[in-house]
Amino acid sequence: MSNAEKVAFGLEGVIALETELSLVEGATANLYYRGYHIDDLVEHATYEEVVYLLFNGDLPSEAELAEFKRTLAREQQVPEPVIALLRSLPKGAAPMAMLRTAVSALAHYDPEAEDNSLEANFRKAIRLTAQAPVLVAAIGRIIQGKEPIPPKDGLSIAANFIYMLNGEEGSEVAVKTLDTALILHAEHGLNASTFAGRVTVSTLSDIYSAATSAVGTLKGPLHGGANEAVMKMLLEIGTPDRAESYVREKLARKERIMGIGHRVYKNGDPRVKHLKRLSQELNREKGTYHWVEISERIEKIMQEEKGLLPNVDFYSASAYYALGIPPELYTPIFAASRMSGWTANFLEQYRENRLIRPRAAYVGPRDRKIQK
Ligand code: COA
């Protein structure tokens, strides 16, 4: 007998826990972090302030922000053996797989790794959030056959990332774009990677194991992996006149168009307008507006044909490309930002833990006997 009718496949619509971190309003296409709308945060806050907000519940005063930035700067030093480990991985390793290995390895160099007190976990959450962008920049250098560059004092997380990746500081608009992208990717309800990490925490495992679970989960093309796939698609299409036939052929083969559709936002993703605007500005400035035109054509056809709208990954692809960031780094950058949201969720889970352990409906054969 099948129990399929009782099963919430993909856990769609299931409310598994309570959170104070973010409110994802699917029907009205709104997203709030601790009660602040993302539009407000994008306009009036920096990524560092958003991280402080996620960890502490309120936006920082000037003095609190200055102190928090000093803490982030102190904690961002990645242990040299972890950089050496990244260098030693086989050539051609996937950057998200490299990040997963590095996040796991960090635990071995943190004397507090096995201290599961709330205080130690708070410090480790900040440490992971500060170190994740440094790891991603190092991975970016290593895959290009270059030496990693350590972070520079006095730069914001966004500015430092560009500096560590390129060896020179970015323009004001480049830093602003990345800062906005970091804000928009920081937190998003009980998405698959946050859920995976919270499940790990719920067994009272350590925070590095939870972060490793989350990175591995974000890696998949149905989750964070979509932004890289979007850019590959844009490069494959090449020119705006080829967009329509490309999409129609894919749909005829029942294939998915990456960066389109969302489990929760059926009426649009509130993060898209910001990334679209930044992508338009950057590509116009760079003389590469065709990437935006191709994206806009895909968006239009998908809406007409399937009633599906772009998600956060769609325009971040062409925005990052205009910043000169290699596509293999798009998902790791997502992870670097989401590390703040993940770890804020892990702290919440440690504080109010109950083992997360659903059940499966058994649909296999029954009452079998061994015949001898
Ligand atoms: N391209 C083509 N068709 C798509 C589609 C896409 N990107 N996304 C959804 N659909 C179609 C499905 O084929 C399905 O059609 P059907 O009912 O005719 O079979 C319908 O829309 C519902 O899709 P389903 O997979 O059940 O929805 P979901 O809520 O599970 O999917 C995603 C959400 C994000 C997994 C899905 O939209 C997707 O695969 N998008 C592309 C990957 C992506 O961008 N991921 C990043 C998410 S932030």
Image: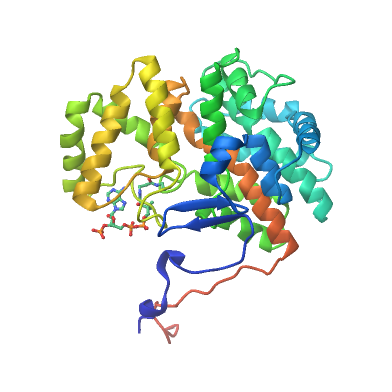
Quarter-of-image position of residue 300: top left
Q: Is residue 366 visible?
A: yes
Question: The N terminus appears in which quarter of the rendering?
Answer: bottom left
x, y percent for residue 39? 51, 42
Q: Residue at 46% across / 24% down in the picture?
A: 326
Q: Residue at 59% across / 36% down in the picture?
A: 44
Q: In this view, does 252 lie to the left or right of 194?
A: left
Give the answer, above or below, for where 73 lies relative to 127: above
Question: The C terminus appears in which quarter of the rendering?
Answer: bottom left
Quarter-of-image position of residue 244: top left
x, y percent for residue 273? 41, 39
Residue 3 versus residue 84: which sits nearer the camera?
3
x, y percent for residue 51? 67, 42
Q: Is residue 90 left or right of residue 112?
A: left
Colour scheme of the picture: rainbow
Give the answer, above or below, for where 135 lies relative to 24: above
Q: Is residue 49 left or right of residue 237?
A: right
x, y percent for residue 14? 48, 69
